[in-house]
Image (cartoon, grey):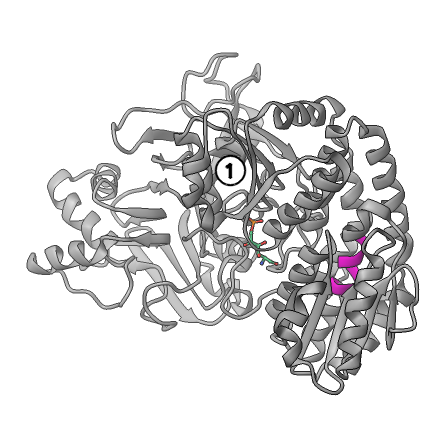
Amino acid sequence: MCGIFGYVGDRRNAGTLVVEGLKNLEYRGYDSWGVACKDGGALHVRKDIGRIGNVDSSEFDHDCGIAIAHTRWATHGGVTQINAHPHLSCDGTIAVIHNGIVENYEKIRSDLKKKGHVFLSETDTEVIPHLIEEEYRRTKDFAAAVRSACLRFEGRYAILALHTESNTLVAARTGSPLIVGVEHSSTPNPSSGGGGETSPSSRGGRSRRMEVNGYFIASDIPAFLEHTNTVQYLDDGEMVVTDGKGILFSDIQTGRERPKREVEITWSVEQAQKGDFEHYMLKEIMDQKESIARAVNQSEEQILKVAKAIREAKGTFLVGCGTAGKACMAAEYFFSVIAEKHVNFAPASEFKLYHHFLKSESLLIVVSQSGETADVLEAMRVAKAKGSTVLAIVNVEGSTIAREADSILLINAGPERAVASTKALTGQLAVLLLIAYALADNLREGRMLLLETCAKINDMLNPRYVERLRDFAEHIKNEEDLYIIGKSWNYPMALESAIKIQEVSYVHAEGFAGGELKHGPIALIEEGTPCIALIGNDEVTQDMLSNAMELKARGASIIGVSPERYGVFDEWIKVPNAGAAQAIVNIIPIQVLAYFLAVKRGKDPDMPRNLAKSVTVK
Ligand code: M6R
């Protein structure tokens, strides 16, 4: 929610740079945008409603080495130019961009108003520059003023601030992500010796230190990936001050310095770009030809360790949100059918109430693509408070969830930028299936099944197949309602199908367990209502066919997604037979269908209304 990006360093085109970089974070929010560039003692500020992606970055070509930029997903205050960030202090010398919510902003604002501060916007954010201004009057030290202000905030936030009288960029985080990118020159720094961590900007583990040319600070890595692969992670409750040459991390509460290592990340710029595809969503769907195999390629030792932890735990809980939650729910079936093991799924936002069941011997497995989802983080903290162990299955290495968990498994899907999660889901399903097989002492069989499934998916996603789905989307694009049914692991996939169709095409779609329809929802079925049935070759095939028949008898038009064609189908979307991995193959044509439904209905599938990729507020 909201993307923030700042730069300080040797480059003189900081304004253009932050606008270009921010375009790579547009998936975090896209209702309005804003930029502040410091040009000598002057501040150039521009903000507007609309998408940063449509902004011409050359308009920010001032001679400046410090700039910040923001793309907003509104929480407090409507989508207006005034509510867009940056927000400024009364005297216009301090500019702040913010991701998160300052929960006690009303109290702070009323205190500040009494001191004469004038507020222009309806946002919680605007109290930040005013409070910093107030503190700066007292301390005459910009970083100290930011720190004192942060000590007053309640809630989750990440901020970036600059001041016309300072050559530093100051950032702080509590709850919302912030990552530092380090740009080194290609020549070694003559003043630095080898080894040891003597300064905050030194490169841990390298024998010769390289001079630093600049620092980037962003909500997510794609903002600066084209400039550097070297990062430093800010943890919760930390702040950072940098002048582009050196950097100082410290604890917001104590003010004490925090040493940091530099980490090289493996994502490439190409992986994070759309290439020849019109949208990220389609590119990421197609990436599944390779990404699932990368998820399967886990260290055997690691998977066996997780299986052992599940065996030994007194209760295993699976937790995630949205699509990741549907992967967890499917895993309940994997563990039951493959390993005869009961695990409990709960949506992360509901997990808080489960603390009554948690013990120090409990195991919590959290699943998250971004590794930043606020509800998942909260669930982890609830579990940690009880002394339970937390395993995270994530895509983004170094994310907050990855760093706070006791151990992690990476799904290695590569950057996922479309708001609609596709390749992350199938990677999560693959890893969870592997764990279920390991738990059944059958890891080798699980790996074989998954690798065969990957080959089948590769064949399935051919241009003719995709074209057929595009034509089918044309055929159903004007439908007002769509229902999807499934049983066993295809039940969570029916729920996931509904999420995919709803979020990108805005068609009303609902998923049900096949057997549940006759207990109420079947009343919605009319002549011609399209119903998708997700079916495999398994112990519930016959039940599913009966459920499809029940719908057809009420006039529904049945679209079967299945390895076999059955008489009840009006339309058949053929998928390969994948046994226990059927959930993985069945969801893929629905992803493609959802994508084309969005395109055919004139919607942008990468940036659906009201949504953001990474939900960092509760
Ligand atoms: O990054 P996470 O996997 O934790 O995100 C969880 C959900 O917000 C996410 O899956 C969401 O439901 C997607 N937009 C669905 O496509």
The quadrant where ligand 1 appears is bottom right
Report the magenta stretch's main SS: helix
SS assignment at label 1: helix
Q: Position of residue 565 (x, y in %)?
A: 93, 66
- The stretch drawn in magenta includes residue 393: no
Most foreground residue, 85 or 360:
360
Amino acid type for the residue under numbered disc 1: Ile
Question: Does mark 1 have its CB less than 8 Å from ligand 1?
Answer: yes
Looking at the picture, does residue 507 appear above or below residue 154?
Answer: below
Most foreground residue, 1 or 89:
1
Q: Which portion, as a residue range, is magenta?
A: 585-591
Residue at 42 percent of width and 38 percent of height: 355
- The stretch drawn in magenta includes residue 587: yes
Q: Quadrant of residue 575?
A: bottom right
Q: Position of residue 580 (x, y in %)?
A: 81, 45
Looking at the picture, does residue 605 appear above or below residue 346?
Answer: below
Residue at 17 percent of width and 44 percent of height: 136
Q: Position of residue 294 (x, y in %)?
A: 77, 39
- Residue count near mark 1 (Cα–Cα under 10 Å), binned few <14, some 14–19, many ≥20: many
Residue 360 in the figure: left or right of residue 116: right
Q: Position of residue 437 (x, y in %)?
A: 77, 33
Most foreground residue, 580 or 56:
580
Residue 565 in the figure: left or right of residue 233: right
Q: Which residue is mark 1?
A: 401
